[in-house]
Image (spheres, grey):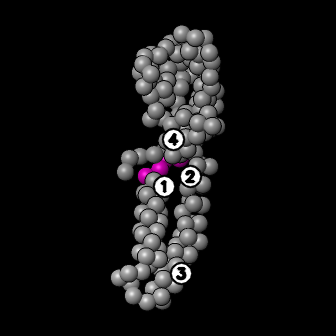
Amino acid sequence: MALTYMTKDGYKKKMEEIAYLESVERPRISAAIAEARDKGDLSENSEYDAAKEAQGMLEMKIAKLKDLVANARIIDETKLNTDEVNILSRVKIKNVNNGMSVEYTIVADSEANLREKKIGASTPIAKGLLGHKVGDIVEIQVPAGLMKFEIEEIAI
């Protein structure tokens, strides 16, 4: 799995999710499997099959989360600057074509949430903004075509 950058808060949330899945969900599914097994013939027991499938899905999710945190690098927010766009930068950009401004925070893909105006670092807009400074006009290829944005402000 690739290296992932996370905030301390994002890392903590993933660790809490792993702990919940292992301490609450895993025993719940094990109990469901045991209950289904007690009902008799396993060859025609759909409850048993469903519980075993749920167990497999849960174990896969736990493994993916563990892999994610094992390859995570925590970003030290105190060392960030506003000279250029970096991960965790809050960037105000203006669409050159229509004059509309929008603000995004560039975060690790695992922490992206469009409702909170947090975009993943691997998105076309984030990739196009990274490394640029206030006043720069960047052209970014998005699914709708080529767009021009002016970087108006960089904050943390």
Per the rendered image, the range of residues in magenta is 69-75
Residue type, mark 4 in image:
Ala
The 10 Å Cα crowd at callout 1, few under 14, some 14 to 19, many 20 or more, is many
Classify 154 as above or below 87.
Answer: above
Residue type, mark 2 in image:
Tyr
The reply to whether the C-beta atoms of the residues labelled 1 and 2 are less than 8 Å apart is: yes
Classify 119 as above or below 142.
Answer: below
Q: Which tag, 4 or 1, sits closer to the chain's start?
A: 1
Q: Which tag, 1 or 3, sits closer to the chain's start?
A: 3
- At numbered mark 3, what does the secondary structure look like: helix, strand or loop? helix
Q: Which residue is mark 2?
A: 11
The 10 Å Cα crowd at callout 4, few under 14, some 14 to 19, many 20 or more, is many
Left or right: 147, with 151 as reference point: left
Q: Quadrant of residue 106?
A: top right
| Residue 152, magenta (yes or no) | no
Q: Which tag, 1 or 2, sits closer to the chain's start?
A: 2
Task: Look at 45% across and 53% down and name the residue there.
Answer: 68
Residue 51 picture location, percent across and down: 47, 74
Foreground residue among 149 and 144:
144
Q: Which mark is residue 31?
A: 3
Alpha carbon separation for disc pair 3 and 2: 30 Å
The 10 Å Cα crowd at callout 3, few under 14, some 14 to 19, many 20 or more, is few
Left or right: 147, with 105 as reference point: left
In this rendering, does residue 16 appear at all?
yes
Q: Which residue is mark 4?
A: 108
Q: Which residue is mark 1?
A: 69
